[in-house]
Image (spheres, helix red, strand yellow):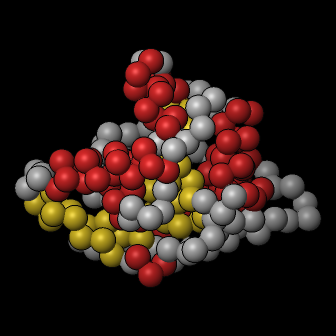
Amino acid sequence: MIKPSYKFYRCCYRFLRAAIGIFYRLEIIGKEHIPDSAAMVCSNHSSMVDPFLIAFAFGINTQIHVIAKSEIFKIPVISQALQLMGMISVDRGVLDAASVKSTLSYLKNGEKVVIFPEGTRVNEDDAIAAKTGAVKLVERTGVPVIPLFLPRKKPLFSKLPIVIGEPYFIEKQAVKRSVSDYSLLSDILMERIKSLNPG
């Protein structure tokens, strides 16, 4: 595994921020909700640019670690760049042992990890049920979850609001939660994300 480089992350940040800034006027709402400590950032997902938009919302001084599908890590040069940026490979949307270990390591170090509960790009709300991996990780680690909203449609050369919601916790229970309990928690998370829609 290639060790992430904050210097490389900042270089990529500056370049991509300038490039994407040509096409969108970003409006960041709710930056005061970002804690200084570790957190799991959970966002809806509809575009390949979403991870970069989230990075821009958190700023150049906060390196985020995005959980992304392993397919994009199979191209040698791109794979090395993604690892240097601190992205986490996950196999077909399943949080395997390696991805969980990386996620826990970053969170333990006080950093921010980004996960898309829908597990894939979705163009319409409620098109698919959210996966339960995000809420399980939040429960396991005890870190706050930060819901974040991105517009599904992103017309070029328009104002693009990115809304960061208030953090909340998913407390562990004495009795292990059932599958339906985790599904409900995932639905609640997605409702919190959708409720941030400023439009």
Question: Residue 156: percent from the left, percent from the top?
Answer: 10, 51
Question: Residue 111: percent from the left, percent from the top?
Answer: 60, 59
Quadrant assignment, res 78: top left
Viewer-proximal residue among 93 and 63: 63
The residue positioned 39% from the left and 61% from the top of the image is 60
Question: Residue 163: percent from the left, percent from the top?
Answer: 36, 70
Q: Is residue 64 visible?
A: yes
Side (left or right) of 23 relative to 149:
left
Side (left or right) of 33 relative to 101:
left
Quadrant position of the N terminus in the picture: top right
Q: Which residue lies furthest to the bottom in this view?
A: 32
Viewer-proximal residue among 33 and 1: 1
Question: Residue 70: percent from the left, percent from the top?
Answer: 52, 26
The residue positioned 44% from the left and 81% from the top of the image is 32
Quadrant position of the C terminus in the picture: bottom left
Q: Is residue 93 above or below residue 16?
A: above
The residue positioned 73% from the left and 41% from the top of the image is 101
The residue positioned 22% from the left and 64% from the top of the image is 26
Q: Residue furthest front?
A: 7
Q: Is residue 166 above or below residue 105?
A: below
